[in-house]
Amino acid sequence: MDSPWDEEISNDAYNGESHWQKIASDFTNAGYREGITAGKEGALQEGFDSGFALTGAPLGRDIGRIRGISSALLALINKATLSFPPGALDELRNIAAQLADIRFSDIVPPDLEAEEHAREHMRTEGEALEMDSEELKDKKDVEGLEDLLAGMSASGNGKERKPQRPTMQDFEVVKKRLEALVGTLGLQIQLS
């Protein structure tokens, strides 16, 4: 016969209640984490959608259109379909070379709000401010090598020069030069 003073009975009741509290706590914590993750994902998606629609896609489309027009004009020259006034061929080749040198990362405006948010987050977390991921560092290293190779002169004079990357203003200047050249040729091409 079981005694009311038997410790195993109270331990079972206590263990059951303790187990129930642990399960409830685990589900509460999991729900909290899922809510935080969903909130972050929602904000991340909203930021991506905005950046893509307002900056990335229009800028990429503009660069692609201008590069495509200059490449098409060069192809027409090579097939002798289009005749050019003196100097126009060299100008077009120069424009195409400058357009080929422009990277999207050169002309996209920085996201100052995101950078400030990252700095603020890092300060509150007490972490060192590191804005670049390993992937971005690798990409910058490759771009640095590309710049170094582009900066090497064929003359081999030994002088080291640091090439300056094109800016949005440089792109606009090249675009205006192409517009002028298209006008000189009497072509009806809309560049914007």
Image: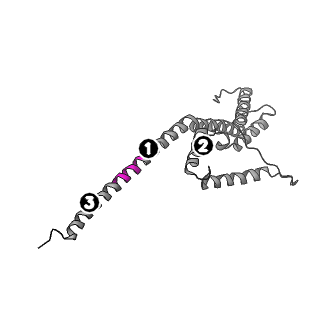
Residue 58 location, x and y as percent? 58, 35
Q: CA distance from mark 2 to mark 1?
A: 19 Å
Q: Nearer the viewer, residue 16 or 53?
A: 16
Q: Amino acid at mark 3?
A: Glu
Q: Is residue 34 magenta?
A: yes
Residue identifier under label 3: 17
Q: Residues within 10 Å of mark 2 (few under 14, many from 20)?
A: few
Which label number is shown at residue 39? 1
Q: CA distance from mark 1 to mark 3?
A: 33 Å
Q: Is residue 78 magenta?
A: no
Q: Nearer the viewer, mark 2 or mark 3?
A: 3
In the depicted structure, whether residue 51 falls above or below residue 131 = above
The image quarter in which residue 72 lies:
top right
The image quarter in which residue 94 lies:
top right
Question: Could you tell me if the residues under marks 2 and 1 are in contact, i.e. CB atoms within 8 Å?
Answer: no
Give the secondary structure at mark 1: helix
Residue at coordinates 79% horizontally, 31% vertically from top-left? 85
Can residue 159 be seen in the rendering of this structure? yes
Residue identifier under label 2: 115
Residue 25 location, x and y as percent? 34, 55
Give the secondary structure at mark 3: helix
Q: Amino acid at mark 1?
A: Gly
Q: Which residues are magenta?
A: 27-35
Q: Earlier in the sequence, mark 2 or mark 1?
A: 1
In the depicted structure, whether residue 83 falls above or below residue 162 = above
Q: Answer left or right for 17 relative to 103.
A: left
